[in-house]
Amino acid sequence: MTSRRRWARNALVGALVLVAGWGTAGWLVVGAPDAVAAESTLRTLAAARGLRIGSAVNAVPLRQEKGYRDKLRYEFNGVTPENAMKWSQVEPVPGQYAWDDADAIVDFAEQSGQMVRGHPLVWHSALPEWLTSGSFTDEQLRAILKQHIEDMTTRYAGRVGAWDVVNEAFNEDGTLRPSIWLDRLGSGYIADAFRWARAADPAAKLYINDFNAEWTNPKSDALYALVRDLRAQGVPVDGVGFQTHVTTNSALSQLKATLARFAGLGIDVAVTELDVRMPLPADDTKLTTQATVYRRAIDACLAVARCVSLTVWGFTDAHSWVPGAVPGWGAADLLDESLQPKPAYTSVHDGLAARDFTGTAVAVQSGRCLDVPNSTATGGVQLQQYGCNSTGAQRFVYNRVGTKTYTITNAQNALCVTVANGSTGNGAAVLQSPCAGLAQQKFELYKVVGSDQDYKLAATHSGKCLRVQDDSTADFARIEQWPCQTDPAAPSKQVWRLTAAPGHP
Ligand code: XIL
């Protein structure tokens, strides 16, 4: 069982305990047990939200530097070998594997409770010389590739949770990248690679991974079409990895939409190699900008339920590939060269800790928005549904006051959504009143399984759900509380699409 599935199962068990009596099919409690300790690290915060936060690992400092090992273990619950599983490293001589570095990383991860993302099985780069300059027939090359995939996946079966099976298969214009594999085996090498990997390790999640696909462009479209077509043919592609090597100039404005778009194919998505480089030397302004870019990345992943992991490509500027790869650029990681947190670290930490959000609530059965009628009254105003119109009357702030419990405050008048008089009766009015921390002003958010933003909102004092009276589709219909609908066959009733809700608990 992957950790993600394990988490989902634990959360579901939690849901059964916490909302015993609810039909559980189709509903999932919003919060995993809170792991926010006094000293919260990236990994404790991420774990509490069902997310893997990982880092690329360099085998040299892993061996030599205690500080590096400690930070890696403390802050991350996932690792990707930066180079140690690349073909040129693991098989420098045909048939003679050099497993030491890869084994060291996998051993460390196992001792540290971290999931390993194996990287990469098929790539145009980092190939051993014997392979690129050998004179093999096409058939021999195909057999060599199959053998390599089987050797890698078999050795680490049960220890590597996900593999980047195919890495960087595309050109920027969306055509397939020329490589020994494409040139000699044809485009079918991609499907073959996934099938061979699945056959050798049925449990590992299998990814295709690339860069510059984080926004809509020909490459991203081509990757999307390929994954869609492969899956239609039954090729076992489980996920898409977005490398996300970017600069402080990147707005990452389309990352969330891109992750959601690919997740719509019914697959997992992941940010796999995040770093945010800047022109050297670093200064405070650049570091602040960098922090906002990191925050956008973590927020994007958190907003998409199927974004299962975010991995940074190295966590300290002391061991980043950037200055070597892009001369004049660097300072791309979360910690500085002395392993001290940079503003980027703080912003990722804050992003993982944050739960509050502001947005509209759309009644799914009617498509209309939760709405405060025109009124200057400071209390007692009955809430209604009304056609969504982007005004402040329909914008609400959700403040997290417990693991899955929120107050809901209108952004315009700062009054709280309240069940009238703390009534526990069916049909009790839901209205506006001054926020006073009352149980009838706190709502538990229960997320619809498989959705990013669809929730039921149950008042904590009554356990009853907010709904539109009689599930009406008309403007001005009043909002009331009603026993929570548990019939999974009618899932749209009492369901609110919270447009800004975090995809992860
Ligand atoms: C990089 C490593 O970080 C460097 O140490 C190495 O010299 C070259 O490869 N995309 C990938 C990664 O998929 O494997 C690359 O890693 C960075 C770009």
Image (tube, helix red, strand yellow):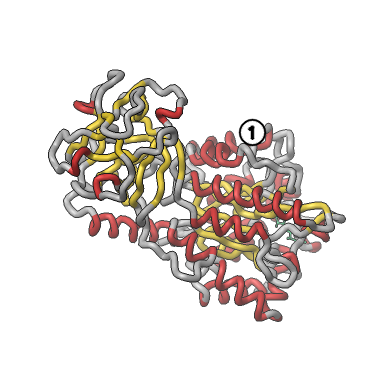
Q: Residues within 10 Å of mark 1 (few under 14, many from 20)?
A: some
Q: Is residue 292 above or below residue 369?
A: below
Percent of width and height locating residue 449 = 35, 45
Residue found at the very far right of the displayed protein: 328
User: Label 1 is placed on what type of residue?
Assistant: Thr
Can see residue 138?
yes
Residue bearing the label numbered 1: 216
Q: Is residue 112 above or below residue 403?
A: below
Res 71 quadrant in image: bottom right
Residue found at the very far left of the displayed protein: 425
Q: Residue at x 74, y 44 (%)?
A: 249
**Quarter of the rendered structure image containing ligand 1:** bottom right
In what element is the residue under mark 1?
A: loop
Percent of width and height locating residue 262 = 53, 39
As drawn, is 65 to the left or to the right of 49? right
Percent of width and height locating residue 128 = 77, 63
As drawn, is 196 to the left or to the right of 458? right
Q: Residue at x 36, y 42 (%)?
A: 408
